Amino acid sequence: MMTFGDAISHRDRYTWLAGIGLALFAFGLTLWFNPAFVALFSHSPAVLKWTTSFGMGLLVLMMVCVFGLAANKVRGARIARENMGQLQALLASVPHLTDILQAHLGVTNSTTEAAALAILLGLTEVEAEAARLLAIQDAGKVRSASLYGKAQALIDESTQHLKDMEIHRCQRALRVEEEGAAIQSIVTQVAELKASTHAIREVTKMTNLLALNATIEAARAGTAGRGFAVVAAEVRNLSKQIEAAAVQIEKSIGQVADTVNNQFVAMLEQHSNDEARWLATLGSTMSRLSGDYQVAVGELDGVTQHTRAAVSSIRNAILDVLGQAQFQDVTRQQIEHVQSGLAMCGQRMTDAQQGMTCDWAAPLDIAPMDGVIETLRVSYTMQSQHATHDVVAGGQASVVENERPSIELF
Amino acid sequence: MPKTILIVDDSATMLMSIKATLEMSGFRVETAGDGMQAMTKLKAGVKPDLIITDINMPNMGGLELIKHVRALPGFRFTPILTLTTESQAAKRDEGKKLGATGWLVKPIAGSDLVKVIKQVVPGA
């Protein structure tokens, strides 16, 4: 293929040859039609003949130059048409390239937007989880205060119960001691009374025996002893009545002793019942306290679980946000490819512009953007870039990479 | 004792993102901006339990790094994962041939990355 430089040298050669031929032709005509020149060589036909031949030669040379110039003109017109065609093809292919680059930028824009939205969503989730965590903490704080107040009341109540029981226990010990002493005194007195009644009964027995003896002696005395016998009978009756009274007194003393004893036992039982009641109340209070404590522990466990879940959720959201930040590396590479495409396009335009400023008739080495587009396609690293390119360019889709997973362990 | 992971990538965003993700998951992380820096660290005595490398990097790319790492004494069985936007099957096959343990395509979710690490690093 003829270069632009070759075209210039050919054109210059033809121009110089045409100029020389024209100059010689003009010189030959001047000599030929000059009468002085003809007269000068009239005596020498050979010189005239050679001069004439030289002029004809010059004429032929001139014809060749004119033909060459005409051919060059025709060729220049053809090259110009070809150059125009190349420029048209170049300009026509520019929109194709810009469509592809626009599509890449569109994908980049979508990627950026999707990542930004995902990051915002992640941050929103983090904020929501943090708010939920705070609400849980606040609720736990309120509930803890409530449980603390309740537990404090139960503890105060238990303390009061213990104080009351201690007072009661002291009073009871004092009362038991006092009442025991009184009862002991009564028992002693009753024992003394029983001894007295025993003595009375002994005296009565003796009196009865004496009365019996008196009756016997009165009967032995006969009439003289009849009055004495009556007295003796009365004494015996009196003695029986006294014995009956003594028996009754002894029986009453026994009943009094039993009553006192029973009351003492009842008093002791009463004290025991009081203590049992106090202890039952205290046990109930402690049971409620234990129940509340279990509730508090359960709620604390619930708060801990909620907190753990919220923190885990926040951690996952942050991990997702960190993953989304990788979009920058992806879009950076997408933009670098667009920059590369634009640079190649700009270079191609600069080449065309420089070629046109030299000589329009010279052939330009301008190719359409197809080469740039193919270079761009080959340089892609991401499947999404191939897909975008293929959609816009309508070329061959690279399906092989589609079959490979994004996570592949060898 | 936390496992140590060396991340090699020329993107500061990627380094920061992956480093934070792995540190949150309990790993110790070393970073390098390209294959050359990574080799310097390994030769200086850093002994990672796993290397995660990008493929397209200045000075020394990921595939060349894998080749050099496998030639180092004591790194024959160290797991090496690639983390790249590169999707060409030929590059994957070359990585596998050079001794890569797995091929991960960016972007990857943090939870997925941690799962893969637990698969390839014993005791992680």
Image (cartoon, helix red, strand yellow):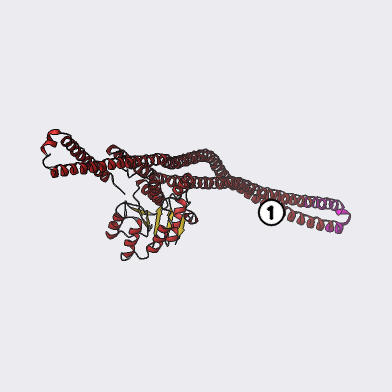
* Front residue (pair B85, B12): B85
Name the image quarter holding residue B95: bottom left
Q: Is residue A157 left or right of residue A104?
A: right
Q: Residue B88: percent from the left, percent from the top?
A: 42, 55
Magenta residue check for A224:
yes
Instruction: Report whether residue A75 is seen.
Output: yes
Q: Residue A263: percent from the left, percent from the top?
A: 68, 47
Q: Quadrant of the C terminus of chain A?
A: bottom left
Name the secondary structure under disc 1. helix
Q: Amino acid at mark 1?
A: Ala
Q: Is residue A2 left or right of residue A312?
A: left
Residue name at image x 76 percent, y 56 percent: A206
* Front residue (pair A279, A7): A7
Instruction: Report whether residue A315 is seen.
Output: no
Q: Is residue A221 above or below residue A144?
A: below
Q: Residues within 10 Å of mark 1 (few under 14, many from 20)?
A: few
Q: Is residue A291 left or right of residue A313?
A: right
Query: Please, which chain is the residue tagged with disc 1 on?
Result: A
Query: What secondary structure do most residues of the magenta stretch adopt?
Result: helix
Q: Residue B22: percent from the left, percent from the top?
A: 40, 52
Q: Is residue A262 left or right of residue A376?
A: right
> Where does label 1 land, which residue?
A195
Q: Is residue B46 above or below residue A2?
A: below
Q: Residue A81: percent from the left, percent from the top?
A: 37, 40
Q: Give the extent of the magenta segment.
A: A216-243
Magenta residue check for B3:
no
Name the image quarter holding residue A292: top right
* Front residue (pair B57, A273): B57
The furthest residue to the front: A43
* Front residue (pair B43, A34): A34
Residue name at image x 11 percent, y 40 percent: A43
